[in-house]
Amino acid sequence: PLQSLPRGTGTTLDPMRLQKIRFQYPPSTRELFRLLCSAHEAPGPAPSLLLLDGLEEYLAEDPEPQEAAYLIALLLDTAAHFSHRLGPGRDCGLMVALQTQKEADSGDVLHLALLQRYFPAQCWLQPDAPGPGDHGLRACLDPGGLGPRTEW
């Protein structure tokens, strides 16, 4: 899992690198499972980052905790596989985005506990205190015991 923000290189990055980004939008949990299970068969270089946005949508399809645990295990295993393919000293980062409800039910609390166990580093975005004409966000990065918590 990604434990910190990437370090700056100090050089201008080639905009053509953006063409290497491959977006995939599995429409269901079953399709996401299929994609992750077959990711090792994909041709070309190994990715340096896996990003799953909207985890809450996949968890809502099948709220059983074992399905969430299976998905988490597949994500971690896929990132570990790509890290191995990238070679020594290079890792495939893993970021998972989840939108939570203010009032969580017992299923959501169980999912959050599972996520916190396997993804100790967390970043929260919250609306800033509303003021006249203000529409800002507060951010907090907690590396899960691997460093100090940062807020901005």
Image (cartoon, rainbow, N blue to C red):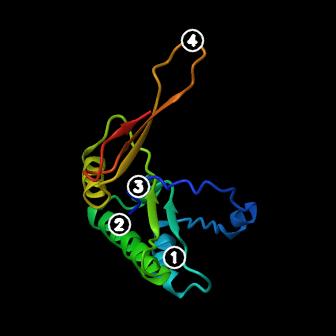
Are the residues at dot 1 and dot 3 in contact (C-beta closer than 8 Å)? Answer: no
Image quadrant where one finds the N terminus? bottom left
Q: Residue furthest right?
A: 16
Image quadrant where one finds the C terminus? top left
Residue 132 is situated, as x and y percent measured from the top left of the image, at 57, 12
Amino acid type, residue under disc 4 in the picture: Pro
SS type, badge 2? helix
Name which residue lies at 69% across and 66% down: 17
Are the residues at dot 3 and dot 4 in contact (C-beta closer than 8 Å)? Answer: no
- Graded by Cα atoms within 10 Å as few (under 14), some (14 to 19) or many (20 or more), the crowding at tag 2 reads some
Residue corresponding to mark 1? 35
Amino acid type, residue under disc 2 in the picture: Ile
Seen from the viewer's position, the closer of residues 99 and 85 is: 85
Residue corresponding to mark 2? 72
Displayed quadrant of residue 45: bottom right
Residue 67 is situated, as x and y percent measured from the top left of the image, at 33, 67
| Front position among marks 2 and 3 | 2
| Front position among marks 3 and 4 | 4
Q: CA distance from mark 2 to mark 3?
A: 15 Å
Residue corresponding to mark 4? 132
| Front position among marks 1 and 3 | 1
Q: CA distance from mark 1 to mark 2?
A: 14 Å
